[in-house]
Image (cartoon, grey):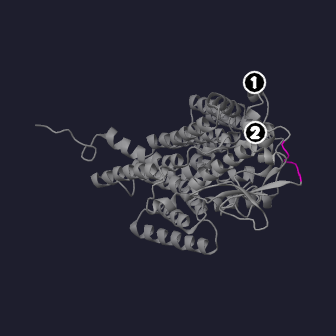
């Protein structure tokens, strides 16, 4: 009698590939569904107000959201449709997640060492999920398609040593679509084209170079035209924004340790002999220790090593993509970690670009399946508020932030229904603001989920003429069990993860 092989013993390539594909997207998916669904958060308050006032044509033809510094019609139309179809922001959150996991799945199909990439993708997303807060925002509609676009260019860069006219046309078409979601696509495409021009200077034909140079010039012209209204920052502001983004991504020593592991793995691929690998690994570890001592993030070291690796392999296109993606935070200088998820994704791809380190084995496959099952069980348990040793404390930041969005929604609903406080304004006691300027960007226990301007606009939409413009009678909102000794507590919303949200008069 023949017995059917199970997943652990089967050597079927499709079965093996499925196991590691699931591992690739599991870190991101676990954290996402842990927090899903978020209520309104950050700019989503203003977006909800705007989407209720505009038509689909307005979304496609006008720059309707304040603070969005460039014209992104497909992104706005996408957000309008998802909001109108669902009546809330939850559908857009799911769409954001689908784009994000599709990006990693696309890279997985072409990467050489699929096992290593699966592990690196899991670690990168699970450890540095702070950047993926965009998944829970309406304005995340800009970043999901852009992330998939970056993954597409990375696949082309690693598969094509030279860019045919046909492939140039296809990537140009993808760029046109992507830049209508986010204009960062134009900047990344410029780096992509510049890399191919450098690669083909000696071995390319004149026709290839002419097409590349013409396309690069047209892309630069389009970028200048679209971004001409953007307010320029000083060099100090740009550098501060870039460093803050890395700090927001690597907020504690445990995450610094994860960054050290990633940098070391990338460093090992630079050396060929065993002796050189030991020297390289030692150098990376010592430099990482110095960065940690100086309280400087280690993640930039991983990025630099990956870029150097591509330069040594004369893959100027991948090196250009890494460089362009790494400086995206400069384009905003807000200090948000979201702008770094793209370069970390590319670095995981580059680190796994060689047939090195880890191979598929029956034991590793079994451990992977065990991990996937464990994650599913932990997710179900935590969502049901069942205490899970160790796991509960690790996932607390995501759950705490989600909890605050629900608490604020309860407070707003209470304010609308409570006639006694109809003449009172609703204000956050603690400030929010951009991460680059805020003192509570890392320790977020008392930090509100949006800024005061966003709350004011949202309340005025729900209650036209709401007294949120400096009235003497003020209700103060606090998060994280914070008490105001000189004020009277008038309402409270319980919270097991971040503590109670309170309203004081």
Contact? badges 2 and 1 (CB < 8 Å): no
Mark nearer the N terminus (2 vs 1): 1
Q: Quadrant of the N terminus?
A: top left
Quadrant of res 48: top right
Tell me if I can see residue 391 in this picture.
yes
Give me the residue at 68% from left, 41% from top: 139
Extreme-front residue of the structure: 420
Q: Nearer the viewer, residue 498 or 484?
A: 484
Judge from the rendering whether residue 288 lies leftward or rightward of residue 49; answer left or right. Answer: left
Which span of residues is magenta-colored?
A: 466-471
Query: x%, y% of residue 389?
Result: 43, 62
Query: x%, y% of residue 140?
Result: 65, 42
The nearer-to-camera label among 2 and 1 is 1
Q: Nearer the viewer, residue 109 or 494?
A: 494
| SS at circle 2 | helix
Query: x%, y% of residue 31?
Result: 52, 50
Tell me if I can see residue 160 in this picture.
no
Which residue in the protein does label 1 denote?
57
Which residue in the protein does label 2 denote?
223
Quadrant of res 196: top right
Query: x%, y% of residue 296?
Result: 64, 68
Extreme-left residue of the structure: 1
């Amino acid at each position: 009698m023949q017995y059917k092989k199970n997943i652990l013993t089967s050597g079927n390539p499709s079965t093996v590939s499925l196991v590691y594909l699931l591992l690739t997207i599991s870190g991101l998916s676990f954290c996402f569904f842990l927090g899903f669904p978020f209520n309104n958060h950050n700019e989503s308050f203003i977006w909800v107000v705007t989407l209720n006032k505009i038509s689909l044509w307005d979304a496609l033809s006008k720059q309707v959201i304040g603070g969005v510094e460039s014209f992104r019609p497909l992104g706005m139309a996408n957000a309008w449709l998802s909001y109108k179809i669902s009546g809330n922001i939850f559908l857009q959150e799911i769409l954001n997640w689908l784009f994000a996991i599709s990006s990693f799945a696309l890279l997985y199909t072409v990467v050489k060492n699929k096992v290593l990439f699966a592990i690196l993708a899991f670690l990168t997303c699970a450890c540095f999920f702070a950047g993926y807060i965009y998944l829970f925002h309406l304005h995340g509609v800009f970043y999901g398609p852009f992330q998939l676009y970056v993954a597409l260019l990375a696949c082309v860069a690693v598969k094509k040593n030279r860019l045919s006219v046909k492939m140039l046309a296809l990537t140009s078409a993808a760029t046109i679509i992507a830049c209508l979601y986010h204009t960062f696509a134009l900047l990344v495409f410029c780096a992509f084209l510049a890399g191919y021009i450098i690669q083909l200077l000696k071995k390319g034909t004149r026709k290839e170079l002419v097409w590349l140079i013409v396309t690069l010039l047209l892309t630069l012209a389009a970028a200048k035209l679209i971004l001409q209204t953007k307010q320029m920052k000083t060099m100090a502001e740009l550098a501060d924004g870039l460093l803050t983004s890395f700090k927001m991504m690597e907020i504690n020593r445990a995450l610094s340790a994860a960054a050290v592991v990633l940098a070391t793995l990338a460093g090992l691929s630079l050396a060929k002999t065993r002796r050189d690998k030991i020297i390289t690994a030692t150098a990376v570890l010592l430099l990482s220790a110095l960065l940690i001592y100086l309280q400087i993030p280690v993640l930039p070291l991983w990025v630099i090593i990956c870029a150097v690796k591509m330069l040594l392999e004369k893959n100027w296109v991948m090196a250009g993509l890494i460089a362009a993606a790494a400086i995206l935070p400069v384009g905003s200088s807000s200090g948000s970690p979201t702008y770094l998820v793209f370069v970390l994704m590319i670095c995981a791809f580059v680190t796994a670009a060689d047939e090195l380190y880890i191979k598929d084995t029956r034991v590793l496959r079994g451990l992977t399946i065990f991990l996937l099952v464990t994650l599913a069980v932990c997710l179900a348990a935590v969502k049901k508020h069942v205490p899970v040793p160790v796991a509960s404390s690790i996932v607390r930041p995501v759950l705490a932030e989600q909890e605050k969005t629900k608490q604020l929604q309860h407070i707003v609903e209470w304010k609308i229904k409570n006639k006694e406080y109809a003449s009172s304004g609703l204000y956050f006691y603690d400030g929010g603001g951009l991460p680059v300027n805020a003192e509570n960007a890392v320790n977020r226990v008392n930090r509100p989920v949006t800024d005061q301007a966003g709350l004011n606009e949202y309340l005025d939409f729900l209650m036209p003429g709401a007294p949120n413009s400096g009235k003497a009678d003020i209700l103060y909102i606090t998060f994280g069990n914070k008490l105001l000794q000189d004020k009277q507590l008038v309402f409270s919303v319980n919270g097991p993860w971040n503590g109670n949200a309170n309203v004081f008069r």
